[in-house]
Image (spheres, helix red, strand yellow):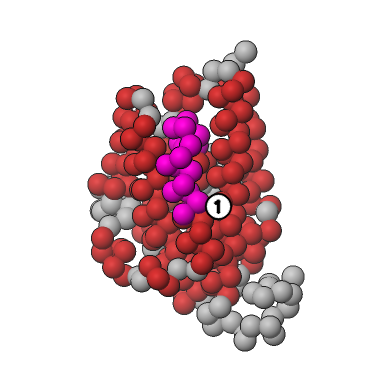
Amino acid sequence: MPYWPRVRVEIDEMVNRQFETPEFKRLFAVPLTPRRLEVYRHHMTYYGSNRRDCWAMVMSKAPLGVKRAIWEHEKDELIHDERMGKAHVTEEDLKEFDESGLSPGARAAFYAWLYCAREKPWLEGLVYSHILERRNNGAIVRGGGLTERWARKQMAELGKSEAELDVQTQVHAVADREHSDIFEPIFERYVVDETSARAVVEAARDGLLIDRALRGAIAGAMLEVEGPPLGTETGPRGGIPG
Ligand SMILES: [Fe+2]
Ligand SMILES: [Fe+2]
Protein backbone atom coordinates (compact mmCIF):
# COMPACT_ATOMS: atom_id res chain seq x y z
CA MET A 1 0.00 0.00 0.00
CA PRO A 2 1.49 3.40 -0.90
CA TYR A 3 1.59 5.15 2.45
CA TRP A 4 2.98 8.56 1.57
CA PRO A 5 0.27 9.57 -0.97
CA ARG A 6 -2.35 8.86 1.69
CA VAL A 7 -0.43 10.72 4.40
CA ARG A 8 0.17 13.63 2.05
CA VAL A 9 -3.56 14.08 1.48
CA GLU A 10 -4.15 14.02 5.22
CA ILE A 11 -1.49 16.56 6.17
CA ASP A 12 -2.43 18.82 3.26
CA GLU A 13 -5.95 18.92 4.63
CA MET A 14 -4.47 19.84 8.03
CA VAL A 15 -2.49 22.79 6.65
CA ASN A 16 -5.62 24.03 4.91
CA ARG A 17 -7.65 23.81 8.11
CA GLN A 18 -4.92 25.74 9.96
CA PHE A 19 -6.37 28.97 8.59
CA GLU A 20 -9.75 28.19 10.14
CA THR A 21 -8.38 27.91 13.69
CA PRO A 22 -9.20 30.62 16.25
CA GLU A 23 -5.54 31.68 16.49
CA PHE A 24 -5.10 32.17 12.74
CA LYS A 25 -8.44 33.96 12.54
CA ARG A 26 -7.36 36.21 15.42
CA LEU A 27 -4.09 37.00 13.68
CA PHE A 28 -5.77 37.94 10.43
CA ALA A 29 -8.39 40.02 12.25
CA VAL A 30 -5.83 42.33 13.89
CA PRO A 31 -6.20 45.74 12.22
CA LEU A 32 -2.73 46.55 10.88
CA THR A 33 -0.73 49.65 11.70
CA PRO A 34 2.96 50.24 10.94
CA ARG A 35 3.87 49.62 14.60
CA ARG A 36 1.91 46.39 14.73
CA LEU A 37 3.68 45.29 11.58
CA GLU A 38 6.98 45.92 13.38
CA VAL A 39 5.82 43.64 16.20
CA TYR A 40 5.10 40.97 13.61
CA ARG A 41 8.51 41.43 11.97
CA HIS A 42 10.20 41.27 15.37
CA HIS A 43 8.58 37.89 16.06
CA MET A 44 9.21 36.56 12.58
CA THR A 45 12.90 37.43 12.78
CA TYR A 46 13.31 35.26 15.85
CA TYR A 47 11.05 32.65 14.32
CA GLY A 48 13.53 32.52 11.41
CA SER A 49 16.37 32.04 13.85
CA ASN A 50 14.48 29.30 15.71
CA ARG A 51 13.85 27.51 12.40
CA ARG A 52 17.62 27.42 11.76
CA ASP A 53 18.26 25.82 15.15
CA CYS A 54 15.55 23.22 14.58
CA TRP A 55 16.59 22.20 11.05
CA ALA A 56 20.20 21.87 12.25
CA MET A 57 19.19 19.61 15.12
CA VAL A 58 17.20 17.35 12.82
CA MET A 59 20.09 17.28 10.38
CA SER A 60 22.47 16.05 13.04
CA LYS A 61 20.61 12.75 13.39
CA ALA A 62 19.06 12.19 9.96
CA PRO A 63 20.43 9.80 7.26
CA LEU A 64 22.86 11.24 4.69
CA GLY A 65 20.29 11.81 1.94
CA VAL A 66 18.12 13.77 4.36
CA LYS A 67 21.11 15.79 5.55
CA ARG A 68 21.71 16.72 1.90
CA ALA A 69 18.11 17.85 1.44
CA ILE A 70 18.24 19.95 4.61
CA TRP A 71 21.59 21.40 3.57
CA GLU A 72 20.08 22.33 0.20
CA HIS A 73 17.18 24.00 1.98
CA GLU A 74 19.45 25.86 4.35
CA LYS A 75 21.51 27.37 1.52
CA ASP A 76 18.72 29.91 0.94
CA GLU A 77 17.85 30.26 4.56
CA LEU A 78 21.24 30.50 6.20
CA ILE A 79 23.80 31.28 3.48
CA HIS A 80 22.38 33.35 0.63
CA ASP A 81 19.17 33.65 -1.33
CA GLU A 82 19.64 35.44 -4.68
CA ARG A 83 16.07 36.72 -4.53
CA MET A 84 16.74 38.42 -1.21
CA GLY A 85 20.36 39.39 -1.75
CA LYS A 86 21.10 37.88 1.66
CA ALA A 87 20.29 34.90 3.84
CA HIS A 88 16.73 34.68 5.16
CA VAL A 89 18.00 35.52 8.61
CA THR A 90 21.25 37.29 9.47
CA GLU A 91 23.04 38.65 12.52
CA GLU A 92 22.01 42.16 11.44
CA ASP A 93 18.34 41.13 11.40
CA LEU A 94 18.62 39.81 14.94
CA LYS A 95 20.39 42.97 16.11
CA GLU A 96 17.50 45.05 14.88
CA PHE A 97 15.24 43.68 17.62
CA ASP A 98 15.59 42.77 21.25
CA GLU A 99 14.88 39.11 21.92
CA SER A 100 13.64 39.93 25.41
CA GLY A 101 10.75 41.84 23.83
CA LEU A 102 9.18 38.70 22.38
CA SER A 103 5.79 37.75 23.75
CA PRO A 104 5.88 34.94 26.35
CA GLY A 105 3.68 32.72 24.16
CA ALA A 106 6.10 33.10 21.25
CA ARG A 107 9.09 32.23 23.45
CA ALA A 108 7.23 29.15 24.66
CA ALA A 109 6.43 28.09 21.08
CA PHE A 110 10.09 28.45 20.08
CA TYR A 111 11.16 26.28 23.01
CA ALA A 112 8.52 23.70 22.11
CA TRP A 113 9.85 23.43 18.55
CA LEU A 114 13.41 23.14 19.84
CA TYR A 115 12.37 20.34 22.17
CA CYS A 116 10.66 18.44 19.35
CA ALA A 117 13.59 18.85 16.95
CA ARG A 118 16.02 17.66 19.59
CA GLU A 119 14.09 14.87 21.28
CA LYS A 120 11.93 13.27 18.58
CA PRO A 121 13.21 10.73 16.03
CA TRP A 122 14.53 12.49 12.91
CA LEU A 123 11.50 11.80 10.66
CA GLU A 124 9.15 13.40 13.16
CA GLY A 125 11.59 16.21 13.89
CA LEU A 126 11.73 16.92 10.16
CA VAL A 127 7.94 17.10 9.95
CA TYR A 128 7.71 19.61 12.81
CA SER A 129 9.72 22.03 10.66
CA HIS A 130 8.55 20.95 7.22
CA ILE A 131 4.86 21.34 8.02
CA LEU A 132 5.38 25.09 8.52
CA GLU A 133 6.61 25.47 4.97
CA ARG A 134 3.79 23.27 3.74
CA ARG A 135 1.24 25.64 5.27
CA ASN A 136 3.13 28.43 3.52
CA ASN A 137 2.89 26.69 0.16
CA GLY A 138 0.28 28.35 -2.04
CA ALA A 139 0.18 25.29 -4.30
CA ILE A 140 -1.15 23.31 -1.32
CA VAL A 141 -3.14 25.84 0.69
CA ARG A 142 -6.30 26.94 -1.11
CA GLY A 143 -6.46 30.72 -1.03
CA GLY A 144 -2.71 31.05 -0.49
CA GLY A 145 -0.19 30.17 2.21
CA LEU A 146 0.40 32.25 5.32
CA THR A 147 2.89 34.71 3.84
CA GLU A 148 0.85 35.20 0.68
CA ARG A 149 -2.23 36.01 2.76
CA TRP A 150 -0.17 38.24 5.04
CA ALA A 151 1.09 40.15 1.98
CA ARG A 152 -2.47 40.66 0.77
CA LYS A 153 -3.50 41.93 4.19
CA GLN A 154 -0.69 44.49 4.23
CA MET A 155 -1.60 45.68 0.76
CA ALA A 156 -5.29 45.95 1.61
CA GLU A 157 -4.94 47.62 5.01
CA LEU A 158 -1.79 49.69 4.72
CA GLY A 159 -2.14 50.50 1.03
CA LYS A 160 1.24 48.98 0.23
CA SER A 161 2.12 47.91 -3.27
CA GLU A 162 3.77 44.54 -3.78
CA ALA A 163 7.13 46.28 -4.25
CA GLU A 164 6.77 48.02 -0.88
CA LEU A 165 6.38 44.80 1.09
CA ASP A 166 9.42 43.85 3.12
CA VAL A 167 11.78 41.50 1.32
CA GLN A 168 11.03 38.60 3.71
CA THR A 169 7.38 38.74 2.80
CA GLN A 170 8.07 39.02 -0.92
CA VAL A 171 10.44 36.07 -1.00
CA HIS A 172 8.55 33.77 1.38
CA ALA A 173 5.37 34.15 -0.61
CA VAL A 174 7.15 31.94 -3.17
CA ALA A 175 10.24 30.35 -1.56
CA ASP A 176 8.39 27.85 0.58
CA ARG A 177 6.78 26.21 -2.44
CA GLU A 178 10.24 25.04 -3.48
CA HIS A 179 11.32 24.46 0.10
CA SER A 180 8.48 22.10 0.85
CA ASP A 181 8.95 20.28 -2.48
CA ILE A 182 12.58 19.47 -1.61
CA PHE A 183 11.36 16.88 0.91
CA GLU A 184 8.92 15.05 -1.37
CA PRO A 185 11.46 12.30 -2.29
CA ILE A 186 12.43 11.95 1.37
CA PHE A 187 8.86 11.24 2.43
CA GLU A 188 8.37 8.90 -0.52
CA ARG A 189 11.35 6.94 0.64
CA TYR A 190 10.75 6.87 4.39
CA VAL A 191 6.98 6.87 4.87
CA VAL A 192 6.63 3.19 4.10
CA ASP A 193 4.52 1.54 6.78
CA GLU A 194 1.79 2.17 9.33
CA THR A 195 4.28 3.25 12.00
CA SER A 196 6.07 5.88 9.92
CA ALA A 197 2.77 7.08 8.44
CA ARG A 198 1.26 7.57 11.88
CA ALA A 199 4.40 9.27 13.19
CA VAL A 200 4.31 11.81 10.35
CA VAL A 201 0.62 12.58 10.81
CA GLU A 202 1.03 13.05 14.56
CA ALA A 203 4.09 15.27 14.18
CA ALA A 204 2.24 17.37 11.58
CA ARG A 205 -0.70 17.75 13.94
CA ASP A 206 1.50 18.81 16.88
CA GLY A 207 3.73 21.07 14.80
CA LEU A 208 0.62 22.89 13.64
CA LEU A 209 -0.60 23.19 17.24
CA ILE A 210 2.64 24.95 18.21
CA ASP A 211 2.22 27.15 15.15
CA ARG A 212 -1.26 28.10 16.37
CA ALA A 213 0.15 28.99 19.79
CA LEU A 214 2.73 31.24 18.15
CA ARG A 215 0.23 33.01 15.88
CA GLY A 216 -2.19 33.59 18.73
CA ALA A 217 0.65 35.04 20.81
CA ILE A 218 1.74 37.34 17.98
CA ALA A 219 -1.85 38.53 17.51
CA GLY A 220 -2.01 39.39 21.22
CA ALA A 221 1.34 41.21 21.11
CA MET A 222 0.23 43.21 18.07
CA LEU A 223 -3.00 44.25 19.76
CA GLU A 224 -1.07 45.56 22.73
CA VAL A 225 0.43 48.36 20.65
CA GLU A 226 -1.66 51.26 19.48
CA GLY A 227 -4.94 49.65 20.44
CA PRO A 228 -7.57 50.98 22.79
CA PRO A 229 -6.66 50.35 26.46
CA LEU A 230 -6.92 46.70 27.42
CA GLY A 231 -10.33 45.74 28.70
CA THR A 232 -12.14 48.26 26.55
CA GLU A 233 -12.00 46.13 23.43
CA THR A 234 -14.80 43.85 22.43
CA GLY A 235 -14.39 40.37 23.81
CA PRO A 236 -11.65 38.99 26.08
CA ARG A 237 -8.20 40.52 26.56
CA GLY A 238 -6.89 41.45 23.15
CA GLY A 239 -10.23 40.51 21.67
CA ILE A 240 -11.21 41.46 18.18
CA PRO A 241 -14.55 42.94 17.29
CA GLY A 242 -16.52 40.57 15.11
FE1 LIG B 1 13.06 31.23 4.89
FE1 LIG C 1 12.44 27.46 4.04
Q: Quadrant of the N terminus?
A: top right
Label 1 amino acid? Answer: Asp
| Snapshot quadrant of residue 92 | bottom left
Q: Is mark 1 within 8 Å of ligand 2?
A: no
Can I make out residue 4 in this image? yes
Judge whether 98 appears above or below 137 on screen. Answer: below
Judge whether 93 appears above or below 123 on screen. Answer: below
| Main SS category, magenta section | helix
Q: Position of residue 155 (x, y in %)?
A: 51, 65
Q: Which residue is mark 1?
A: 211
> Magenta segment: does it hold 138?
no
Q: Position of residue 193 (x, y in %)?
A: 58, 18
Q: Secondary structure at mark 1?
A: helix
Name which residue lies at 36% across and 32% down.
61
Range of the magenta residues? Answer: 111-127
Name which residue lies at 47% across and 76% down.
34
Q: Quadrant of the C terminus?
A: bottom right
Q: Position of residue 157 (x, y in %)?
A: 56, 70
Viewer-proximal residue among 93 and 158: 93
Name which residue lies at 44% across and 48% down.
114
Quick check: 205 left or right of 147? right
Name which residue lies at 59% across and 23% down.
195
Task: Answer few, some or many: residues within 10 Å of disc 1's Cα (few below 14, many 20 plus, some between 14 and 19).
Answer: many
